[in-house]
Amino acid sequence: MSRENWNWLWLYPATLVVHLLEEQLGGARFYEWVERSPGAELTATEFFGLTAFAVLGLTALTLTMLRWEGWRFLAVSVVVAFFLNSISHIINSMIAGGYTPGLATGIIIWWPLTWFAIRRCRRLLRPRAFRMGLAIGVAIQLGVMVTTLVFTVL
């Protein structure tokens, strides 16, 4: 498969930055919103550290997937993790009874991008690689949720 078929992967690091900007600038900052929950703490420094790690890690993964075809199944993982993150923003907004930082980009950007990317990955990947990518994507989002809990509640 040619590299051109996969250049759309750069949309994920780019949209992650947009999403994180919304979490920082969209009304209440995400780390301030987290601290509204009883017993939860997330400092600005922790938030910026976690998000910098996420952006750098996703950029490195994107470079890897573009360079080595055998790693491209992880594109599905990224797509699933981002989509599940948008679902978590919807659930948190329903629980909170209003907007939560990151909700808009999660729905407006990641839902259409998920539709596009899943269709593309299903066409370009073997079924087994696609399924493995799905499972890893769920695991990634669970890891993000656990990490968030560790940093905010424990």
Image (cartoon, grey):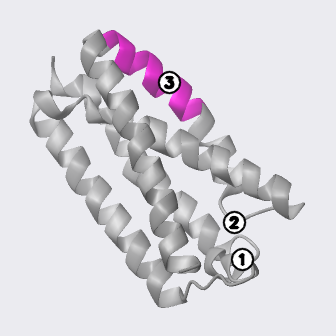
What residue range appears in magenta? Answer: 112-123
Name the N-terminal-most of marks 3 and 1.
1
Give, as a three-letter code, the residue at label 2.
Pro
Dots 2 and 1: beta carbons under 8 Å?
Answer: yes
Residue corresponding to mark 1: 33
Instruction: Name the residue: 65% across, 50% down.
Output: 88
Q: Position of residue 39 (x, y in %)?
A: 68, 84
For the residue carrying disc 1, how many other residues have a C-alpha within 10 Å: few (<14), some (14-19), or many (20+)?
some
Please tell me whether mark 3 sits on a helix, a strand or a loop: helix
Give residue 137's mark. none
Residue corresponding to mark 3: 116
Q: Position of residue 21 (x, y in %)?
A: 56, 68
Separation of residues labelled 2 and 3 (CA atoms): 24 Å
Give, as a three-letter code, the residue at label 3.
Phe
For the residue carrying disc 2, how many other residues have a C-alpha within 10 Å: few (<14), some (14-19), or many (20+)?
many
Instruction: Name the residue: 30% across, 26% down.
Output: 132
For the residue carrying disc 3, how many other residues have a C-alpha within 10 Å: few (<14), some (14-19), or many (20+)?
few
